[in-house]
Image (spheres, helix red, strand yellow):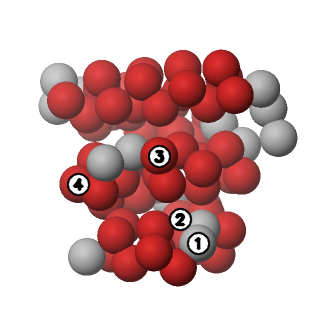
């Protein structure tokens, strides 16, 4: 697992892109990160942002990320 500050920076970056409505930049940040990091990122984002971010992932990657998430986080991203 990467250092915590990397994940904190990634969460902040994706959150900022989402709050500005820059879905393309958020998607680019998500697909450039390793799958395990994306799973942790989605668990750290607020539920609404996590749901949007999850839907930005390519289908195959989303499936892999979903399988790595814990059950409560899985429910949040598909709600």
Instruction: Quadrant for the N terminus, please.
Output: top right
Q: Which mark is residue 48?
A: 4
Disc nearer the start of the sequence (3/1): 3
> Alpha carbon of mark 2 to alpha carbon of mark 4: how far?
16 Å
Visible residue check, residue 35: yes
Disc nearer the start of the sequence (4/1): 4
Residue at label 1?
Answer: 70
Residue at label 3?
Answer: 44
| 54 in relation to 75, above or below | above
Instruction: Quadrant for the C terminus, please.
Output: bottom left
| 35 in relation to 8, above or below | below
> Alpha carbon of mark 1 to alpha carbon of mark 2: how far?
14 Å
x 45%, y 75%: residue: 72
Disc nearer the start of the sequence (3/2): 3
Mark 3 or mark 4: which is in front?
3
Q: Position of residue 61 (x, y in %)?
A: 60, 61
The part of the image, by quadrant, that contains residue 70 is bottom right
x 23%, y 54%: residue: 48
Visible residue check, residue 64: no
Q: Secondary structure at mark 4?
A: helix
Residue at label 2?
Answer: 62
Q: Secondary structure at mark 1?
A: loop
> Alpha carbon of mark 3 to alpha carbon of mark 2: how far?
16 Å
Q: Is residue 3 left or right of residue 13?
A: right
* Marks 4 and 1 in Cβ contact (< 8 Å): no
Q: Secondary structure at mark 2?
A: helix
Disc nearer the start of the sequence (1/2): 2
Mark 2 or mark 4: which is in front?
4
| 12 in relation to 59, above or below | above
* Marks 3 and 1 in Cβ contact (< 8 Å): no
The total of numbered circles placed on residues is 4
Disc 2 residue crowd, few under 14, some 14–19, many 20+, Cα 10 Å: some
């Amino acid at each position: 697992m990467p250092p915590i500050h990397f994940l904190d920076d990634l969460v902040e970056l994706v959150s900022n892109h989402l709050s500005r409505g820059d879905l393309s930049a958020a998607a680019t940040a998500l697909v450039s990160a390793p799958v395990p990091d994306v799973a942790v990122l989605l668990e750290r984002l607020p539920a609404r942002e996590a749901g949007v971010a999850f839907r930005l992932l390519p289908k195959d990657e989303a499936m892999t990320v979903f399988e790595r998430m814990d059950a409560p986080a899985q429910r949040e991203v598909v709600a």
